[in-house]
Image (cartoon, helix red, strand yellow):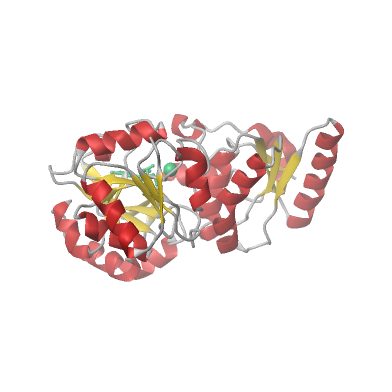
Amino acid sequence: MNTLKLTTEPADIARAARIIAEGGLVAFPTETVYGLGADALNEAAVAAVYQAKGRPSDNPMIVHIAGVEELSRLTADESEDIRRVTEAFWPGPLTIILRKLPAVPDRTTGGLDTVAIRMPETEAARELIRLSGCPIAAPSANLSGSPSPTRARDVIADLDGRIDAVICGDDCRVGIESTVLDLTSEQPMILRPGIITAERIAAALGKDVAYDPSLKEAAKHTALDPEKGAQDSDFKPKSPGMKYRHYAPRAEMHIISGAQDRVREEIRRRQEAYEKEGRKVGVILFEEAAFAEAAHDLFSRLRDLDAAGVDVILAGALNDADGVGFAVMNRMLKSAGYSVIRV
Ligand code: AMP
Ligand code: MG
C-alpha cells in the first residue's frame, strides 16, 4: 500500500477525514504522541489498526473526540467528577475511563466494558475528528513495542506502506502519552501517569486521587536509596504485565539511578568500559528536574540513538516521586526492561 503523506492544510485534512469515514487508517499529530486513527465505531477498521501496529488485541485503544457533547455517543455516564476534569483539562493530555455504550465495539476496548476517551489539544486532530463525523480510536502510531512516535518521520519509519495516510504536522509538544484516569469507581485512579499529575487532578476534583498500585511498585525501584547499593541492578518485576517490553529501543538499555554527580561518574565509567569492548554507547542524561524537557525528548532520543546504531544506551534516572518526572520514569523503565543500576 502506498501511504499518502499529507499536510495540515484544510484540503489535506478533509481528504484524511474521508479516508477515516470510509474505514481507512490515518496517522495524525496530537500534543502527546502521533496517533494511528480509525473510526472507533467501525469494527473492521479498528481490527486493521491492531494489524498495522502488530498490537496484541487485548490492549484497548483511546477514543478521541472533538467536543464534550460527543461523550454521549460513547458513554451514558455523567457525574460531577467528569464535568470537573473535562472542564479543567480538555482539550489536553488527559484520558478518562468510563462505562461504554453497546455501540462501542469490543474490538475498540479490548473486550472491556469500559472505554478510554480523550479530547486532543492539537487543532489538526480535532478538525480531523469533526470532518470524519465519528469518534477516532487511536493508539500510538508506531509498531507495537517500539518507542512512541513524536515526529512525523518516526511514524513514516515504522508504518510507511502499512497505513493509508499520515498527516505530517509539527513535533509533539508533550512527547509522552496522556495521563489515564479511571472514573468508573468512587475513588478516581491513575492507571498511567502523564504530564497532568495526580496533584493537579486532585485539585480539580477537590478529592484524593489514587495510583494503580502496580505503578508505585515499579517506581519504588527508582527512588534514591543509597543503602541498597548496586546489588539491586537485576531487579525483576513481580507482575507479569510489567515484564512486557514496551517503548523499547533496539539497543540494550540500562538506567543509572542515584545522586546526580555519582550517576554522571558511573555513566562515564561504564561508557569507557563498553567502548573498550568495542561497543558503541549512547547516553541520555537530562538536566536535573527538567522533567517537561525529558518528556519531550525521551522517545525521539531513543529513536535517534537506534538510528545512529548504538549498541548500549545508558540513561540517568529522574528523581521525582509523583510529578512529570515520575511519568517519564514510567516510560524509561519499560524502555530499559526495568534494568536499573543504583550508585
Ligand atoms: P496507547 O493507545 O498506546 O496510548 O495506549 C492506550 C492505553 O490506555 C492502554 O495501554 C491502556 O493502558 C489504557 N486504556 C485504554 N482503554 C482502557 C480501558 N477501557 N480501561 C483501562 N485502561 C485503558
Ligand atoms: Mg502505545
Which quadrant, please, contains the C terminus?
A: top right
Q: Is residue 289 visible?
A: yes
| x 59%, y 57%: residue | 294
Q: Is residue 75 visible?
A: no
- In the image: residue 32, left or right of residue 21: right
| x 20%, y 52%: residue | 134
| x 42%, y 44%: residue | 141
Q: Quadrant of residue 109?
A: top left
- In the image: residue 111, left or right of residue 311: left
| x 34%, y 67%: residue | 89
Q: Is residue 327 above or below residue 339?
A: below
Q: Is residue 159 above or below residue 74?
A: above
Relative depth, front residue between 75 and 339: 75
Q: Quadrant of ligand 1?
A: top left
Relative depth, front residue between 18 and 154: 18
Which quadrant, please, contains the N terminus?
A: top left
Q: Residue 39 location in percent, x, y?
A: 24, 46
Q: Residue 172 location in percent, x, y?
A: 48, 59
Relative depth, front residue between 163 and 210: 163
- In the image: residue 120, left or right of residue 81: right
Q: Residue 287 location in percent, x, y?
A: 68, 61
Q: Residue 80 location in percent, x, y?
A: 21, 66
Q: Is residue 177 above or below residue 91?
A: above
